[in-house]
Image (tube, grey):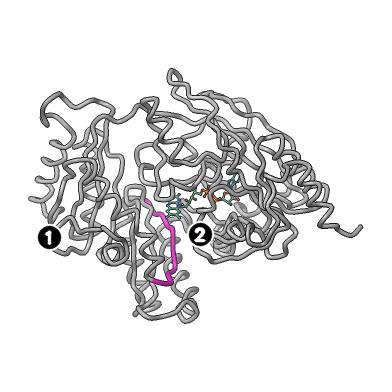
């Protein structure tokens, strides 16, 4: 039977109404491309349901008509996971109208929210209840909690609180058959068979649609110390972090490493950005310690700021620190963070670049950095390496900016050589080719190349079993 697109769209309309349906080309456009503008897909419609029941009805309709369903949150993903295929026999299912906080349990330290709530709203709601939701990343003003969980997002506080997988207790999911699995349990302990929740976390919408989640909360920090530190090398950065765990009494919440090249791009492209230190240095660390223990009234004594100052002083004597500034107030701390968080935006403005979101064990990071940078330079001597990121998690955005003045076409001729050179070093160091951004479309081939046969076979078996029609975000993570 031939497929009748207008009849299909009419059935979608009967589920979500006019408000929940976008069919005109102009309206659909922002949902068809990714943040980096690497891909442009096509879709019969963008559907924007307001309830789990509507999501389930849409999926059942798509299953009956063999139409692909591409879940989408804030569309800030960096691997093309939320972009529909070019074939056009697909709908983008945007969760952004499912944006209600359903419950905050301050006694049990949990929050239940719909998948389309923007991450910043989750953070602000937790803060308003004197609690902390620690997931924090530069896209937090537009990414959604459903997208965060589906990509198992990392961000800048993983070394203390863990990545998204560790911040969630329960899920509600719509399966590829359009059934609703209610796993919204706020249980810390539940050993009743296979952990279905873990299947959907980091699955990038290929196994089902997350519609709600029970999130974990923490006490709100009352004492925070933030410093901007010039270090001689990545080796010094890792040694500084290693000593900081004990010096801070296990209160290190962030440790980010940046190169001078990245800072130069931020200073050039981001209005208001300023270098906190008088001299230029090759490497910088943004170090943050935080604790729920309140500072003593009327003094700095015993505070994390005082401890950090003493620690950085000792580290300077050992040659691990060249210069440092400790934020004296919240706005200074925010200015330090802006230098780090604007790296992606500044790189985008500078022109084409190739991104590698890699991880190695923290202790291997210094040696990896040396070999990785040498490999990148060998692959394209004129390229401009921009390594930055979560050195405290062993995760660097090991990026290469195009030589000044090169356009994308010319640069991308070297893309494969640069990426292979980097990934070969990563694999030699026992690392990962995607630490926090996922696989999506961008890294399909790399995953197939670098993961073992048994891992790939198991992933394909899972996908075929849970989504036998291959309608749930097909062509992402694994091809079946
Ligand atoms: P989308 O981009 O809409 O979707 C991402 C994937 O999840 C897609 O495969 C999509 O199909 C799927 N999906 C979305 N919602 C659902 C759902 N409800 N159910 C099932 N599947 C779903 N990431 C990090 O981990 N750490 C960082 O530090 C970080 N920094 C960033 C900085 C910038 C400037 C930008 C632009 C991105 C950054 N990211 C980072 C990447 C991105 O923000 C995260 O991957 C984020 O978690 C994606 O959320 P989203 O709502 O935008 O998801």
**Residue 145 on image: x %, y %:** 51, 40
Cβ at disc 2 under 8 Å from ligand 1 = yes
Left or right, 165 with reference to 156: right
Whether label 2 touches label 1, CB < 8 Å? no
Measured in 3D between alpha carbons, the distance from the residue under mark 2 to the one under mark 1, in whole angstroms, is 35 Å
Residue annotated with mark 1: 278
**Residue 264 appears in which quarter of the rendering?**
bottom left
Outermost residue toward the top in this view? 107
Residue occupying image coordinates x 68% and y 38%: 174
N-term mark: 2 or 1: 2
Give the magenta part as a residue range: 351-361
Viewer-nearest residue: 313 or 63: 63
Left or right, 260 with reference to 374: left
Residue annotated with mark 2: 35
Q: Secondary structure at mark 1?
A: loop
User: From what the image shows, is residue 457 above or below residue 304?
Assistant: below
Cβ at disc 1 under 8 Å from ligand 1 = no
User: From what the image shows, is residue 477 above or below residue 261?
Assistant: above
Viewer-nearest residue: 280 or 420: 280
**Residue 84 on image: x %, y %:** 65, 58
Q: Is residue 357 magenta?
A: yes
Outermost residue toward the right in this view? 1
Q: Secondary structure at mark 2?
A: loop
User: From what the image shows, is residue 346 above or below residue 14?
Assistant: below
**Residue 56 appears in which quarter of the rendering?**
top right
Work out which quarter of the rendered image holds the N terminus and state it: bottom right
Viewer-nearest residue: 111 or 230: 111
Work out which quarter of the rendered image holds the C terminus and state it: bottom right
**Residue 379 on image: x %, y %:** 40, 77
Q: Is residue 195 magenta?
A: no
Residue occupying image coordinates x 60% and y 41%: 97
**Residue 118 on image: x %, y %:** 49, 41
């Amino acid at each position: 039977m031939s497929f009748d697109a207008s009849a299909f769209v009419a059935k979608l309309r009967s589920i979500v109404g006019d408000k929940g349906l976008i069919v005109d080309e102009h309206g659909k456009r922002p949902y068809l491309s990714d943040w980096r503008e690497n891909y442009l897909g096509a879709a019969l419609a963008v559907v924007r349901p307001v309830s789990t029941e509507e999501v389930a009805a849409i999926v059942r309709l798509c299953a009956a008509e063999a139409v692909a369903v591409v879940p989408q949150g804030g569309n800030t993903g960096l691997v093309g996971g939320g972009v529909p295929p070019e074939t056009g026999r697909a709908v983008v299912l945007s969760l952004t109208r499912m944006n209600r906080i359903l419950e905050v349990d301050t006694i049990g330290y949990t929050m239940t929210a719909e998948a389309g709530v923007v991450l910043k709203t989750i953070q602000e709601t937790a803060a308003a209840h004197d609690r902390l939701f620690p997931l924090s990343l530069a896209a937090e003003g537009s990414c959604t909690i459903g997208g965060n969980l589906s990509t198992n997002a990392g961000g800048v506080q993983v070394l203390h609180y863990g990545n998204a997988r560790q911040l969630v207790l329960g899920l509600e999911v719509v399966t590829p058959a359009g059934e609703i699995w209610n796993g919204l349990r706020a249980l810390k302990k539940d050993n009743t068979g296979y952990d279905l929740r873990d299947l959907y976390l980091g699955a990038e919408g290929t196994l089902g649609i997350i519609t709600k989640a029970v999130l974990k909360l923490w006490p709100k920090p009352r004492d925070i110390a933030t410093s901007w530190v010039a270090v001689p090398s990545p080796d010094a950065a890792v040694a500084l972090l290693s000593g900081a765990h004990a010096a801070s009494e296990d209160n290190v919440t962030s440790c980010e490493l940046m190169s001078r090249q990245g800072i130069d791009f931020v200073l050039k492209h981001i209005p208001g950005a300023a270098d906190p230190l008088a001299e230029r240095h090759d490497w910088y660390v943004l170090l943050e310690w935080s604790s729920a223990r309140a500072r003593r009234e009327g003094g700095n004594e015993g505070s994390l700021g005082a401890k950090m100052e003493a620690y950085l002083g000792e580290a300077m004597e050992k040659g691990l620190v060249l210069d440092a500034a400790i934020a004296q107030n919240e706005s200074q701390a925010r200015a330090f963070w802006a230098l780090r968080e604007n790296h992606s935006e500044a790189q985008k403005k500078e022109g084409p670049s190739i991104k590698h979101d890699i991880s190695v064990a923290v202790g291997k990071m210094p040696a990896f950095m040396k070999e990785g940078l040498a490999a990148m330079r060998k692959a394209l001597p004129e390229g401009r390496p921009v390594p930055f990121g979560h050195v405290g998690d062993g995760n660097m955005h090991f990026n290469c900016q195009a030589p000044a003045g090169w356009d994308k076409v010319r640069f991308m001729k070297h893309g494969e050589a640069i990426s292979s050179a980097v990934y070969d070093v990563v694999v030699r160091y026992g690392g990962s080719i995607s630490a926090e951004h996922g696989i999506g479309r961008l890294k399909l081939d790399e995953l197939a190349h670098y993961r073992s046969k048994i891992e790939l076979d198991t992933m394909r078996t899972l996908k075929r079993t849970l989504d036998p029609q291959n309608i749930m975000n097909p062509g992402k993570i694994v091809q079946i």
